[in-house]
Amino acid sequence: MHLLNNISFENTELFFLLLFPIAHLIWFFFVNKNTNRVFSFSNTSFISSKKNIKEKLVNLPYILQLLCISFIIISLARPQTTNSWEESKTQGIDIILALDISGSMLAKDLKPNRLEASKEIAIDFIKQRKNDRIGLVIFSGESFTQCPLTTDHNSLINLFQDIEYGMVEDGTAIGDGLGNSINRLIDSETKSKIIILLTDGENTKGKISPLTAAEIAASDSVGIKVYTIGVGTKGMAKSPVALDFNGNFIYDFVEVKIDEESLTEIAKKTGGQYFRATDNLSLKEIYNTINKLETSELESIKFNTKNEEFYLFSWIALVLFLLSFLLQISYFRKIS
């Protein structure tokens, strides 16, 4: 039954040939029914006023022959079954997280400080991006790649957790951080390439200006979108200002200075957006927003395979032919 439900025919025009056995059947039983026909059989015990089974089945070989021809025609019509399935392929996004690790990132307006809060919330973001390749660039007075693009998010998270202040010379080289991130993505063949750049200050060091780096990212040959995040409360924040005799930071309230104009321009040039995070909750909401804006592409590919089923009908035709032949030479054999 399952086969019959899924069957289709490639050469449906051949079904008109079925008119011939149907027409012959009509002629045989309705037009030719009054014709006197004499049958001679090897066994005459059936001759009586009452018809026996042999008399009743005398037309069986003929009917089997017509059925045989019908199944041959069905075979010629190329019966087929179709198997269909769908494969889903996810096209991920290549993402570089560019993180400022300068001394001002130790300010305590985010808890426990800007750097640790940024690490923790970025790790939550990474866990949600299962189909993407993600890399990590850090910058302060200079920039380097902490982790190249990878789908091994567990290793990336471990490297993220190892980040701390003092890994590189202090300062804020936003342009170098952005330029290094672009280099990580420039050879990527994915359709979507983005940089999430997080900083809490102004560009004070580096070999390349942030806006020059943004122009490179925005060029047609590169095509990288940059989301910029300025971290820090509006007003004063408790920040490290000096070291005591034991090498511990001394904190005092310092005015928060973020170059929002440049960060906004970077985002605008590249088709991204600028966000301001003033506390842990707002930073988390920013990452959630980016997560929704940059969704992976899901491609569905449908496959069809056709299986020829003519052999089944051909075997039925062969069996019907052999059965008709055997009945004719045995049970319904004529006496010569």
Image: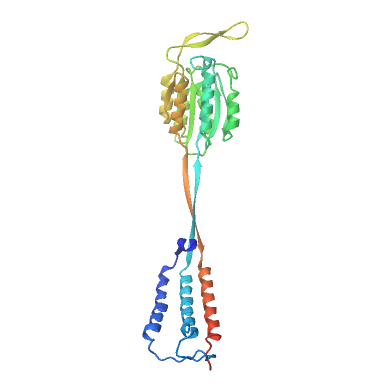
Residue 178 position, x and y percent, is: 50, 26
**Foreground of the two, 98 or 310:** 310
Residue 12 position, x and y percent, is: 42, 68
Vertically, is 295 above or below 204? below
Residue 99 position, x and y percent, is: 52, 23
Residue ranking furthest to the right: 246
**Colouring convention used in this rendered image of the protein:** rainbow
Vertically, is 200 above or below 214? above
State the residue at coordinates (41%, 75%).
Answer: 18
State the residue at coordinates (59%, 6%).
Answer: 244
State the residue at coordinates (55%, 28%).
Answer: 136
Q: Is residue 279 visible?
A: yes
**Foreground of the two, 301 or 145:** 301
State the residue at coordinates (48%, 49%).
Answer: 301
Residue 215 position, x and y percent, is: 45, 28
Vertically, is 249 above or below 264? above
Q: Is residue 182 visible?
A: no
**Foreground of the two, 91 or 157:** 157
Quarter holding residue 166: top right
